Amino acid sequence: MKIKKAVFPVAGLGTRFLPATKAMAKEMLTVVDKPIIQYAVEEAFDAGIEQIIFVTGRGKKALEDHFDRSFELELTLEKKKKMDTLKMIQELVPRTGTIIYTRQNEPRGLGHAIWCARDIVGDEPFAVLLADDLIKSSTPVLSQMIRRFDRLRSSIAAVMEVDRDQTDKYGILDAEEIEDNVVRVKGMIEKPSPDKAPSNLAIIGRYILTPRIFDFLGQKKTGAGGEIQLTDAMEQLLEIQPVFGYKFEGTRFDCGDKAGFQMANLAFAMERPDLKERLSKFIMDMGKSVCG
Protein backbone atom coordinates (compact mmCIF):
# COMPACT_ATOMS: atom_id res chain seq x y z
CA MET A 1 0.00 0.00 0.00
CA LYS A 2 1.35 3.43 -0.92
CA ILE A 3 2.29 5.80 1.91
CA LYS A 4 -0.09 8.69 1.28
CA LYS A 5 -0.44 10.40 4.68
CA ALA A 6 2.07 12.05 6.98
CA VAL A 7 1.48 13.16 10.57
CA PHE A 8 3.27 16.24 11.92
CA PRO A 9 3.06 16.58 15.72
CA VAL A 10 3.37 20.36 16.16
CA ALA A 11 1.59 21.03 19.45
CA GLY A 12 4.78 21.52 21.50
CA LEU A 13 5.35 24.78 23.37
CA GLY A 14 9.00 25.25 22.38
CA THR A 15 10.09 26.17 25.89
CA ARG A 16 13.78 25.70 25.04
CA PHE A 17 13.55 28.71 22.72
CA LEU A 18 11.85 31.15 25.05
CA PRO A 19 11.37 34.07 24.84
CA ALA A 20 11.36 33.75 21.02
CA THR A 21 8.55 31.18 21.16
CA LYS A 22 6.37 32.99 23.69
CA ALA A 23 4.06 34.25 20.95
CA MET A 24 5.29 32.25 17.95
CA ALA A 25 5.16 28.55 17.15
CA LYS A 26 8.63 27.01 17.42
CA GLU A 27 8.07 25.37 14.02
CA MET A 28 8.01 28.86 12.50
CA LEU A 29 11.59 29.62 13.54
CA THR A 30 13.52 30.10 10.32
CA VAL A 31 16.59 28.35 9.01
CA VAL A 32 18.00 31.01 6.67
CA ASP A 33 14.69 32.32 5.27
CA LYS A 34 12.37 29.35 5.54
CA PRO A 35 10.48 28.03 8.62
CA ILE A 36 11.70 24.64 9.80
CA ILE A 37 8.20 23.21 9.32
CA GLN A 38 8.36 24.08 5.62
CA TYR A 39 11.50 22.00 5.15
CA ALA A 40 9.69 18.99 6.62
CA VAL A 41 6.53 19.53 4.57
CA GLU A 42 8.58 19.83 1.38
CA GLU A 43 10.36 16.58 2.28
CA ALA A 44 6.99 14.86 2.65
CA PHE A 45 5.66 16.13 -0.68
CA ASP A 46 8.93 15.20 -2.42
CA ALA A 47 8.44 11.66 -1.11
CA GLY A 48 4.98 11.42 -2.69
CA ILE A 49 2.88 12.16 0.38
CA GLU A 50 -0.59 13.34 -0.62
CA GLN A 51 -2.05 14.47 2.69
CA ILE A 52 -0.43 16.38 5.56
CA ILE A 53 -1.96 16.01 9.03
CA PHE A 54 -0.90 18.67 11.53
CA VAL A 55 -1.58 17.81 15.17
CA THR A 56 -1.67 21.28 16.68
CA GLY A 57 -2.27 23.00 19.99
CA ARG A 58 -2.79 26.54 21.22
CA GLY A 59 -0.73 29.31 19.65
CA LYS A 60 -0.24 27.68 16.24
CA LYS A 61 -2.20 30.15 14.12
CA ALA A 62 0.95 31.46 12.42
CA LEU A 63 1.73 27.93 11.22
CA GLU A 64 -1.76 27.54 9.77
CA ASP A 65 -1.56 30.96 8.10
CA HIS A 66 1.81 30.10 6.56
CA PHE A 67 0.22 27.36 4.45
CA ASP A 68 -2.80 29.46 3.49
CA ARG A 69 -3.42 32.24 0.96
CA SER A 70 -2.55 35.84 1.88
CA PHE A 71 -4.47 37.91 -0.64
CA GLU A 72 -3.25 41.27 0.70
CA LEU A 73 0.40 40.21 0.45
CA GLU A 74 -0.08 38.69 -3.00
CA LEU A 75 -1.78 41.86 -4.26
CA THR A 76 1.04 44.02 -2.88
CA LEU A 77 3.71 41.86 -4.54
CA GLU A 78 1.82 41.95 -7.83
CA LYS A 79 1.54 45.74 -7.74
CA LYS A 80 5.29 46.02 -7.07
CA LYS A 81 6.02 43.64 -9.97
CA LYS A 82 7.83 41.20 -7.65
CA MET A 83 6.61 38.24 -9.65
CA ASP A 84 9.28 35.74 -8.56
CA THR A 85 8.46 36.38 -4.90
CA LEU A 86 4.74 36.21 -5.66
CA LYS A 87 5.15 32.83 -7.33
CA MET A 88 7.15 31.51 -4.36
CA ILE A 89 4.46 32.63 -1.90
CA GLN A 90 1.68 31.08 -3.97
CA GLU A 91 3.53 27.78 -4.25
CA LEU A 92 3.52 27.46 -0.46
CA VAL A 93 -0.22 26.80 -0.54
CA PRO A 94 -1.17 23.22 -1.45
CA ARG A 95 -4.47 22.39 -3.05
CA THR A 96 -7.57 22.27 -0.86
CA GLY A 97 -7.79 19.14 1.29
CA THR A 98 -4.08 18.44 1.19
CA ILE A 99 -3.54 19.79 4.70
CA ILE A 100 -5.76 18.77 7.61
CA TYR A 101 -5.55 20.09 11.19
CA THR A 102 -6.53 18.29 14.37
CA ARG A 103 -5.98 19.29 18.00
CA GLN A 104 -4.02 17.74 20.84
CA ASN A 105 -5.93 19.34 23.68
CA GLU A 106 -3.40 18.50 26.38
CA PRO A 107 0.38 17.93 26.24
CA ARG A 108 0.61 14.19 26.90
CA GLY A 109 3.61 13.30 24.76
CA LEU A 110 4.53 12.33 21.20
CA GLY A 111 2.62 9.06 21.33
CA HIS A 112 -0.57 10.84 22.34
CA ALA A 113 -0.13 13.44 19.58
CA ILE A 114 0.09 10.70 16.95
CA TRP A 115 -2.91 8.90 18.47
CA CYS A 116 -4.92 12.13 18.01
CA ALA A 117 -4.60 11.64 14.22
CA ARG A 118 -5.95 8.06 14.22
CA ASP A 119 -9.35 8.81 12.65
CA ILE A 120 -7.76 10.80 9.82
CA VAL A 121 -5.03 8.23 9.14
CA GLY A 122 -7.46 5.31 9.12
CA ASP A 123 -6.38 1.73 8.44
CA GLU A 124 -3.24 2.34 6.37
CA PRO A 125 0.48 2.78 6.95
CA PHE A 126 1.58 6.38 7.43
CA ALA A 127 4.63 8.56 7.98
CA VAL A 128 5.51 10.71 10.98
CA LEU A 129 7.90 13.65 10.67
CA LEU A 130 9.26 15.69 13.56
CA ALA A 131 10.18 19.10 12.16
CA ASP A 132 12.82 19.71 14.85
CA ASP A 133 14.97 17.11 13.11
CA LEU A 134 16.15 18.91 9.99
CA ILE A 135 18.13 16.58 7.73
CA LYS A 136 20.34 17.81 4.91
CA SER A 137 20.63 15.11 2.25
CA SER A 138 20.79 14.65 -1.50
CA THR A 139 17.73 12.38 -1.37
CA PRO A 140 15.00 13.30 1.15
CA VAL A 141 15.15 10.91 4.10
CA LEU A 142 11.46 10.03 3.89
CA SER A 143 11.97 9.02 0.25
CA GLN A 144 14.84 6.76 1.32
CA MET A 145 12.62 5.17 3.98
CA ILE A 146 9.63 4.66 1.70
CA ARG A 147 11.81 2.70 -0.70
CA ARG A 148 12.78 0.41 2.18
CA PHE A 149 9.18 0.11 3.35
CA ASP A 150 8.07 -0.97 -0.10
CA ARG A 151 10.26 -4.04 0.39
CA LEU A 152 10.09 -4.67 4.15
CA ARG A 153 6.35 -3.86 4.54
CA SER A 154 6.68 -3.16 8.26
CA SER A 155 7.30 -0.23 10.60
CA ILE A 156 10.59 1.65 10.17
CA ALA A 157 12.30 4.35 12.22
CA ALA A 158 15.18 6.51 11.03
CA VAL A 159 18.22 5.87 13.25
CA MET A 160 21.73 7.18 13.77
CA GLU A 161 24.58 6.67 16.22
CA VAL A 162 24.90 9.31 18.94
CA ASP A 163 27.52 9.97 21.59
CA ARG A 164 27.15 7.56 24.47
CA ASP A 165 26.57 10.35 26.98
CA GLN A 166 23.58 11.56 24.92
CA THR A 167 21.42 8.43 25.12
CA ASP A 168 19.14 9.99 27.74
CA LYS A 169 17.80 12.34 25.04
CA TYR A 170 16.57 9.65 22.60
CA GLY A 171 14.76 6.41 22.13
CA ILE A 172 17.60 3.87 22.01
CA LEU A 173 17.55 0.54 20.16
CA ASP A 174 18.69 -2.96 20.94
CA ALA A 175 19.07 -4.17 17.36
CA GLU A 176 21.00 -6.36 14.96
CA GLU A 177 22.08 -5.41 11.45
CA ILE A 178 20.41 -7.54 8.78
CA GLU A 179 21.64 -5.72 5.66
CA ASP A 180 23.39 -2.51 4.67
CA ASN A 181 21.90 0.38 6.67
CA VAL A 182 19.00 -1.70 8.00
CA VAL A 183 18.70 -3.17 11.50
CA ARG A 184 16.00 -5.37 12.96
CA VAL A 185 14.86 -4.09 16.33
CA LYS A 186 14.90 -6.50 19.27
CA GLY A 187 13.96 -3.92 21.88
CA MET A 188 13.96 -0.21 22.61
CA ILE A 189 14.11 2.08 25.62
CA GLU A 190 13.01 5.71 25.85
CA LYS A 191 15.74 8.06 27.11
CA PRO A 192 17.87 5.58 29.08
CA SER A 193 20.85 6.76 31.10
CA PRO A 194 24.17 5.86 29.41
CA ASP A 195 24.81 2.99 31.85
CA LYS A 196 21.44 1.41 30.99
CA ALA A 197 21.40 2.02 27.23
CA PRO A 198 21.64 -1.19 25.13
CA SER A 199 23.53 0.72 22.40
CA ASN A 200 24.12 4.23 21.10
CA LEU A 201 21.77 3.73 18.14
CA ALA A 202 19.11 6.42 18.48
CA ILE A 203 15.75 6.98 16.81
CA ILE A 204 15.55 10.25 14.87
CA GLY A 205 12.34 12.08 13.95
CA ARG A 206 11.24 10.13 10.87
CA TYR A 207 8.96 7.08 11.04
CA ILE A 208 6.81 4.90 8.83
CA LEU A 209 4.26 3.10 10.99
CA THR A 210 1.59 0.51 10.40
CA PRO A 211 -1.91 1.30 11.73
CA ARG A 212 -1.58 -1.38 14.44
CA ILE A 213 0.43 1.19 16.41
CA PHE A 214 -2.86 2.88 17.32
CA ASP A 215 -3.93 -0.22 19.27
CA PHE A 216 -1.05 0.34 21.68
CA LEU A 217 -1.11 4.14 21.72
CA GLY A 218 -4.81 3.90 22.56
CA GLN A 219 -3.96 2.12 25.83
CA LYS A 220 -2.52 5.50 26.94
CA LYS A 221 0.18 3.99 29.11
CA THR A 222 2.57 6.61 30.43
CA GLY A 223 6.34 6.19 30.33
CA ALA A 224 9.36 8.48 30.59
CA GLY A 225 8.45 11.95 31.82
CA GLY A 226 4.91 10.80 32.66
CA GLU A 227 4.00 11.03 28.96
CA ILE A 228 2.59 8.60 26.41
CA GLN A 229 5.72 7.62 24.51
CA LEU A 230 5.79 6.40 20.91
CA THR A 231 8.86 4.31 21.73
CA ASP A 232 6.90 2.31 24.34
CA ALA A 233 4.09 1.62 21.85
CA MET A 234 6.61 0.52 19.21
CA GLU A 235 8.15 -1.90 21.70
CA GLN A 236 4.70 -3.44 22.21
CA LEU A 237 4.25 -3.55 18.44
CA LEU A 238 7.35 -5.75 18.29
CA GLU A 239 5.32 -8.55 19.87
CA ILE A 240 3.14 -8.89 16.76
CA GLN A 241 5.15 -7.31 13.91
CA PRO A 242 8.80 -6.76 13.06
CA VAL A 243 10.14 -3.24 13.44
CA PHE A 244 13.22 -1.99 11.60
CA GLY A 245 15.69 0.85 11.91
CA TYR A 246 17.10 2.58 8.85
CA LYS A 247 20.49 4.31 8.93
CA PHE A 248 19.72 7.21 6.61
CA GLU A 249 22.03 9.12 4.29
CA GLY A 250 22.36 12.74 5.32
CA THR A 251 23.36 15.13 8.09
CA ARG A 252 20.87 15.71 10.87
CA PHE A 253 20.53 18.99 12.75
CA ASP A 254 18.62 19.11 16.04
CA CYS A 255 16.67 22.34 15.62
CA GLY A 256 15.07 21.83 19.02
CA ASP A 257 18.48 22.65 20.49
CA LYS A 258 19.91 26.17 20.31
CA ALA A 259 23.36 25.08 19.15
CA GLY A 260 21.92 22.64 16.62
CA PHE A 261 19.61 25.34 15.30
CA GLN A 262 22.53 27.71 14.71
CA MET A 263 24.52 24.93 13.01
CA ALA A 264 21.58 24.29 10.68
CA ASN A 265 21.38 27.96 9.74
CA LEU A 266 25.07 28.03 8.93
CA ALA A 267 25.07 24.76 6.95
CA PHE A 268 22.05 25.69 4.83
CA ALA A 269 23.21 29.28 4.32
CA MET A 270 26.56 28.06 3.00
CA GLU A 271 24.68 26.36 0.16
CA ARG A 272 23.26 29.69 -0.99
CA PRO A 273 25.34 31.40 -3.71
CA ASP A 274 24.09 34.81 -2.53
CA LEU A 275 25.36 34.20 1.02
CA LYS A 276 28.31 31.83 0.81
CA GLU A 277 31.08 34.31 -0.02
CA ARG A 278 30.23 36.79 2.76
CA LEU A 279 29.67 34.04 5.30
CA SER A 280 32.94 32.30 4.43
CA LYS A 281 34.87 35.48 5.12
CA PHE A 282 32.97 36.05 8.36
CA ILE A 283 33.64 32.48 9.56
CA MET A 284 37.34 32.81 8.79
CA ASP A 285 37.55 36.14 10.63
CA MET A 286 35.64 34.71 13.59
CA GLY A 287 37.93 31.70 13.68
CA LYS A 288 41.00 33.90 13.80
CA SER A 289 39.45 35.97 16.57
CA VAL A 290 38.47 32.95 18.70
CA CYS A 291 41.81 31.22 18.20
CA GLY A 292 43.59 34.39 19.20
Image: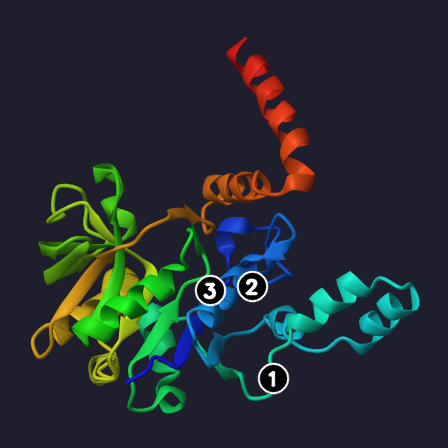
For the point 56% across and 42% down, the residue is 271
Q: Is residue 109 visible?
A: no
For the point 92% across and 69% down, the residue is 79
SS category of the residue bearing label 1: loop
The residue type indicated by label 3 comes to: Glu
SS category of the residue bearing label 2: helix
Residue 16 position, x and y percent, is: 49, 50
Vertical position of residue 273 compared to residue 235: above or below = above
Categorize mark 1 by other alpha carbons within 10 Å: few (<14), some (14-19), many (20+).
few
In whole angstroms, how far apart are the C-alphas of marks 2 and 1? 16 Å
Give the residue number, with chain letter if any, for mark 3.
43
* Number of the label disc, if any, that sits on residue 38: 2
| Quarter of image, res 141 | bottom left
Vertical position of residue 165 compared to residue 122: above or below = above
Q: Earlier in the sequence, mark 1 or mark 3?
A: 3
Q: State which quarter of the image contains the N terminus.
A: bottom left
Q: Nearer the viewer, mark 3 or mark 2?
A: 3
The residue type indicated by label 2 comes to: Gln
For the point 37% across and 48% down, the residue is 250
Residue 6 position, x and y percent, is: 41, 76
Q: Are marks 2 and 1 in contact (CB under 8 Å)?
A: no
Give the residue number, with chain letter if any, for mark 1.
95
